[in-house]
Image (cartoon, grey):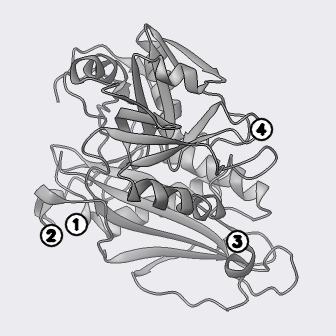
Amino acid sequence: MASNGDHAHADRTTEIQNHIRSMPTPSYKVPSTMRCQSSLAANDMETSEVADLDWENLGFDLVQTDFMYVAKCGPDGNFSNGEVIPFGPIALSPSAGVLNYGQGLFEGLKAYRKTDGSILLFRPEENAIRMRAGAERMCMPAPTVEQFVGAVKQTVLANKRWVPPNGKGSLYIRPLLMGSGAVLRLAPAPEYTFIIFVYPVGNHYKEGLNLIVEDKFHRASPGGTGGVKAIGNYASVLKAQKIAKEKGYSEVLYLDAVHNKYLEEVSSCNIFVVKGNVISTPEIKGTILPGITRKSIIEVAQSKGFKVEERLVSVDDLFDADEVFCTGTAVVVSPVASITYLGKRRGRISKPRSWCRISAAVQVTYKPTDG
């Protein structure tokens, strides 16, 4: 990937090699093409088996891999060391807390392959910290940051043949924490299970997003769980999403539940609005998920001289913007092609040339060195 060599500081990512060691702090670069990519791999990849997939046409769908990670936690609040086992179904009591009361959280992160065959993880410590914050809100114990990152490493290494070739996609990593113990009355579960499974994925949205602003349904409300990755947050958006997709839209953009006029987030990603040299995004106030890609883009944009505002962003700001884009683990950084609100549509928001201007300034490339 081409770069102008302009580096900015970034948080530490993790390099996974056969003996598992940490890589030093990466650097941000400005690529000449629109690609937000980070890689993850082991140095022996050139001699290891590679899965037989059509890597050129990899979608964002379920592809069964080889192994998953499982750890248990009892009433003492401490997780076992866990183990990597063959991927497959799990046994749950019908009275499990996650099934009856929705006591569950998940995370999402990715592993990427570099040109030399090695693999990189994108900021796994941030996902561990966010899971711990969400677990506290949901009255659940959580793995330590070290346990979380170690489990992710084990799972990726066990499934390394499923990491797509450089530039062909990524390995999507899904850590899941749930109340697996049986419980009848409304109370925290007596046992918890931490699982990690993975899937190779391509680009989620290969074209610009066509969004519709939802004016009837709301994703979250003040005091609720909108600011954590609770499993129930995603079931509640399915109705509006289904209606939107039936009408030909890519996704739904939600408004705040109090004033019904300020932007919050898309079903599974954060949103940014660009006007001149100012990049604005809805502030984190308990109803919006603190996205890790969002945080990374803010850091990089500021290092490139953009003014970043975390504030109340109205629908009017959206229609007056020079450019609009979304960020998230699945969408990475994706331009918004059109916005529709109360029957009013604005198309061609992020034209290719103007999109490249912002994209080149905020895309992240990690250049690891041996530690």
What kind of residue is marked 4? Val
Task: Answer few, some or many: residues within 10 Å of disc 3's Cα (few below 14, many 20 plus, some between 14 and 19).
Answer: some
At horizontal 38% and vertical 51% (from top left) the residue drawn is: 110
Q: Is residue 28 left or right of residue 235?
A: left
At horizontal 40% and vertical 18% (from top left) the residue drawn is: 8
How far is mark 3 from mark 1, CA to CA? 34 Å
Circle 4 SS class: loop
Circle 3 SS class: loop
Mark sitting on residue 49: 2
Q: Nearer the viewer, residue 54 or 352?
A: 352
* First of labels 2, 3 by sequence position: 2
Circle 2 SS class: loop
Mark sitting on residue 161: 1
Q: Is residue 178 left or right of residue 266?
A: right
* First of labels 4, 1 by sequence position: 1
Q: Percent position (x, y) of residue 212?
A: 47, 42
Whether label 1 touches label 2, CB < 8 Å: yes
What kind of residue is marked 3? Gly
Whether label 3 touches label 1, CB < 8 Å: no
* First of labels 4, 2 by sequence position: 2
Determine which quarter of the picture holds residue 6: top left
Nearer the camera: disc 2 or disc 3:
3
Q: Percent position (x, y) of residue 43?
A: 22, 52
Circle 1 SS class: helix
- Residue under label 3: 102
Q: Percent position (x, y) of residue 342?
A: 53, 37
At horizontal 88% and vertical 83% (from top left) the residue drawn is: 185
Task: Answer few, some or many: residues within 10 Å of disc 2's Cα (few below 14, many 20 plus, some between 14 and 19).
Answer: few
Q: Is residue 272 left or right of residue 6?
A: right
